[in-house]
């Protein structure tokens, strides 16, 4: 009986040693660079305390599953530039234009002070154009009888841009183009 106990013990030790060597080789090969994915094997290795504990030797843990690469997502759509100019600031910038100051002075002079030039917000909802928001104003000749529109403007809320709504072509044009084509500085009345 003594001989069979020694044989069993040797068999258990040999089995444990073989397992340790196999796990060591697996770990070594898993750390070696490869063209495909690299898999790391993690298994606890504990030597048995006695021959009777050899029956409780656990099998090695299965190989770790490789981590999935994060999915590349499309960038979010461009957002509207942040508002840097309030409606009131936009109106002040518009009234500071030399053309509107000239028109206001002409209206005062021609009416003997009975009419004044001013801005009228014709739509409180900002207009979206090319991804930007614009305040919508009309320059009007304001008297006790009526408010006569001279020109309509779009004032950007996100930068210094001011556009003019061209009634003949139904498009928004730049101040530079408006000045070149319409000659607003020469205008003295609502119909000119």
Image (spheres, rainbow, N blue to C red):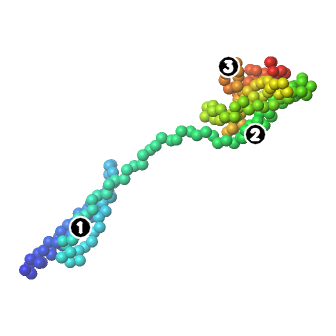
**Percent x, y for residue 128?**
63, 33
| Residue for point 7% across, 80% down | 1
Q: Give the farthest residue toward the right.
A: 112
**Percent x, y for residue 29?**
28, 58
Q: Characterize the local packing of mark 2: few (<14), some (14-19) or many (20 or more) Cα atoms within 10 angstroms.
A: few
Say left or right for 111 vs 132: right
Task: Compare marks 1 and 3 and give the one earlier in the sequence.
Answer: 1
**Percent x, y for residue 15?**
18, 68
| Residue for point 42% across, 46% down | 71
Q: In the depicted view, which residue is nearer to us: 179 or 153? A: 153
Element under disc 3? loop
Q: In the depicted view, which residue is nearer to us: 178 or 110? A: 110
Mark 1 to mark 3 CA distance (whole Å): 84 Å
| Residue for point 67% across, 19% down | 169
Task: Compare marks 2 and 1 and give the one earlier in the sequence.
Answer: 1
Which circle marks residue 143 in the picture? none
Q: In the depicted view, which residue is nearer to us: 6 or 85? A: 85
Which circle marks residue 89 in the picture? 2
Mark 2 to mark 3 CA distance (whole Å): 28 Å
| Residue 141 seen in the current view | no
Rendered position, 163 above or below 181 = below
Q: Name the residue under label 1.
A: 58
Task: Compare marks 2 and 3 and give the one earlier in the sequence.
Answer: 2
Q: Nearer the viewer, mark 1 or mark 3?
A: 3
**Percent x, y for residue 123?**
69, 31
Q: Mark 3 points at which residue?
A: 169
């Amino acid at each position: 009986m003594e001989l069979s106990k020694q044989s069993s013990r040797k068999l258990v030790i040999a089995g444990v040693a073989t397992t340790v060597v196999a796990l060591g080789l697996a770990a070594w090969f898993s750390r070696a660079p490869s063209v495909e994915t690299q898999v790391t094997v993690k298994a606890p290795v504990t030597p048995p305390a006695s021959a009777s504990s050899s029956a409780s030797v656990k099998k090695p843990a299965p190989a770790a599953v490789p981590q999935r690469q994060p999915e590349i997502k499309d960038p979010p759509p461009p957002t509207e530039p942040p508002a840097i100019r309030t409606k009131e600031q936009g109106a002040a910038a518009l009234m500071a234009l030399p053309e509107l100051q000239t028109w206001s002075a002409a209206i005062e002079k021609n009416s003997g002070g009975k009419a004044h030039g001013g801005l009228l917000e014709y739509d409180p909802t900002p207009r979206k154009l090319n991804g930007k928001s614009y305040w919508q104003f009309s320059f009007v000749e304001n008297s006790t009888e009526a408010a006569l529109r001279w020109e309509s403007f779009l004032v950007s809320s996100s930068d210094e841009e001011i556009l003019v709504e061209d009634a003949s072509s139904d498009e928004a044009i730049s101040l530079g183009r408006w000045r070149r084509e319409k000659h607003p500085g020469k205008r003295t009345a609502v119909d000119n």
